Image: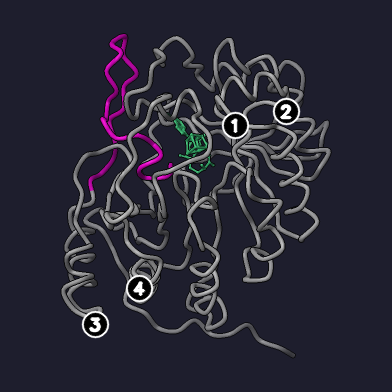
């Protein structure tokens, strides 16, 4: 009988609240080919390219985290697949899958480049991806993303599906925008065998729109769905912020990410690194640690891993987002900086 490879012993990163940090999300670019209304302003100033960590440095950084016990790595952005040559990073990181040090290498994408990269992603060992898709209406899609083409994204999703990658659709629930479409989105996802997760808008970064105007609490969405479908809470927890329910009529499941109506921090197992090497210990707090300096200060990982450990020692208990009447965001940085 074959046995799964034994996990190599690695030191654990444990924060002051006893939470084991095993999940790293890495934003590989702040750029994007879309300008989603809730995420970016129309006119964004992106970082000068020379400020970004190189792909080799990103590989070193991720590998240093794997060396201190990170088991799950998610590549995000901006739009990660618009970073030039990004597949070389995936290919390099896949060695940690092969060695068993890493359990999962995944991606969050807007889907625009999936047609091009799906087969290669599957080939390097990506088994699951999250694709952000808020609507199945081409005009609304163009409006919400300001420049996206729904047909291209749907073709990309199909390519990923055909390549054997499991798909989870993430949709931001937006009052007066896609709220009436949520049942059809749910049925479309489940008919294709995709999971669906709904997200509440979070007050990150200055955008033109007033977010309060489109903020839609998910307990309301859930109550409305419960009028049409039989929803049953699932015990499934991924260490992440989503709570899942099964939908009897479709046989699928739906997740709810509710940063605004429920605090999801108590089981948080994750940290985030930006494309400039800044480590954020909490999506909803400003405190951060610079990892670029220790990364560049020596070729070994000792300084880097010491900086990581020191930063995890400051991981806060939780965020305190409040969606207020004021237009000012709770945090100045955009979601595209830390990748969600
Ligand atoms: N470009 C990729 C994408 O769209 O999937 C990856 C980066 S994007 C910042 C990651 C996720 O953050 C997307 O699912 C997006 O819908 C979500 N997001 C962006 N801004 C948000 C906000 N203000 N509130 C809630 N979710 C947001
Ligand atoms: Fe780009 Fe993703 Fe932000 Fe939309 S949500 S603008 S696709 S980074």
**Residue sitting farthest toward the bottom:** 1
Q: Are marks 1 and 2 in contact (CB under 8 Å)?
A: yes
Q: Given this view, does label 2 or label 4 mark the residue nearer the observer?
A: 4
Q: In the rendered structure, which segment of residues is drawn in magenta?
A: 316-340
Dot 2 or dot 4, earlier in sequence: 4
Point 52% across, 39% down: residue: 33
Picture quarter with the N terminus: bottom right
Dot 2 or dot 3, earlier in sequence: 2
Q: CA distance from mark 1 to mark 4?
A: 32 Å
How packed is label 2: few (under 14 Cα within 10 Å), some, or many (20 or more)? many
- Return the residue at label 2: 185
Query: Is 248 situated left or right of 99 in this image?
Result: right
- Return the residue at label 4: 60
- Most common SS among magenta residues: loop
From what the image shows, is residue 90 above or below residue 111?
A: below
How packed is label 4: few (under 14 Cα within 10 Å), some, or many (20 or more)? some
Q: What is the x, y in percent for residue 18?
A: 28, 58
From what the image shows, is residue 204 above or below residue 213?
A: below
Dot 1 or dot 3, earlier in sequence: 1
Q: CA distance from mark 1 to mark 2?
A: 9 Å
Q: Given this view, does label 1 or label 4 mark the residue nearer the observer?
A: 4
- Return the residue at label 3: 300
At mark 1, the secondary structure is strand
- Return the residue at label 1: 171
Q: Given this view, does label 1 or label 3 mark the residue nearer the observer?
A: 3
Front-most of residues 225 and 275 = 275
Point 51% across, 17% down: residue: 216
Point 50% across, 28% down: residue: 36
Q: CA distance from mark 2 to mark 3?
A: 48 Å
């Amino acid at each position: 009988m074959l046995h799964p490879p034994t996990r190599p012993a690695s030191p654990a990163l444990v924060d002051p609240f006893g939470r084991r940090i095993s999940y790293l999300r890495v934003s590989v670019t702040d750029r994007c080919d879309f300008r989603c209304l809730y995420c970016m302003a129309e006119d964004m100033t992106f970082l000068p390219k020379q400020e970004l960590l190189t792909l080799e440095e990103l590989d070193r950084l991720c590998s240093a985290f794997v060396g201190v016990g990170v088991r799950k790595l998610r590549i995000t952005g901006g739009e990660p697949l618009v970073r030039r040559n990004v597949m070389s990073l995936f290919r390099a990181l896949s060695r940690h899958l092969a060695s068993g040090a890493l359990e999962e290498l995944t991606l969050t994408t807007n889907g625009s480049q999936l047609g091009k990269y799906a087969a290669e992603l599957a080939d390097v060992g990506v088994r699951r991806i999250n694709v952000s898709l808020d609507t199945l209406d081409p005009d609304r899609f163009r409006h919400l993303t300001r420049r996206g083409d729904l047909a291209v994204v749907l073709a990309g999703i199909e390519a990923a599906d055909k390549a054997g990658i499991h798909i989870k659709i993430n949709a931001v629930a937006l009052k007066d925008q896609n709220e009436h479409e949520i049942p059809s989105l749910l049925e479309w996802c489940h008919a294709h065998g995709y999971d669906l997760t709904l997200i509440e808008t979070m007050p990150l970064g200055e955008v033109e729109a007033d977010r309060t105007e489109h903020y839609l609490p998910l307990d309301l969405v859930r109550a409305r769905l419960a009028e049409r479908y039989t929803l049953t809470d699932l015990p499934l927890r991924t260490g992440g912020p989503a709570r899942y329910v099964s939908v009897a009529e479709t046989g699928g499941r739906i997740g709810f990410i509710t940063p605004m109506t429920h605090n999801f921090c108590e089981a948080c197992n994750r940290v985030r690194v930006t494309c400039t090497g800044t480590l954020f210990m909490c999506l909803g707090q400003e405190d951060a640690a610079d990892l670029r300096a220790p990364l560049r200060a020596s070729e070994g990982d000792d300084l880097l891993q010491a900086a990581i450990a020191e930063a995890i020692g400051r991981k806060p208990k939780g965020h305190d987002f409040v969606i207020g009447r004021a237009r000012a965001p709770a945090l100045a940085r955009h979601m595209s900086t830390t990748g969600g």
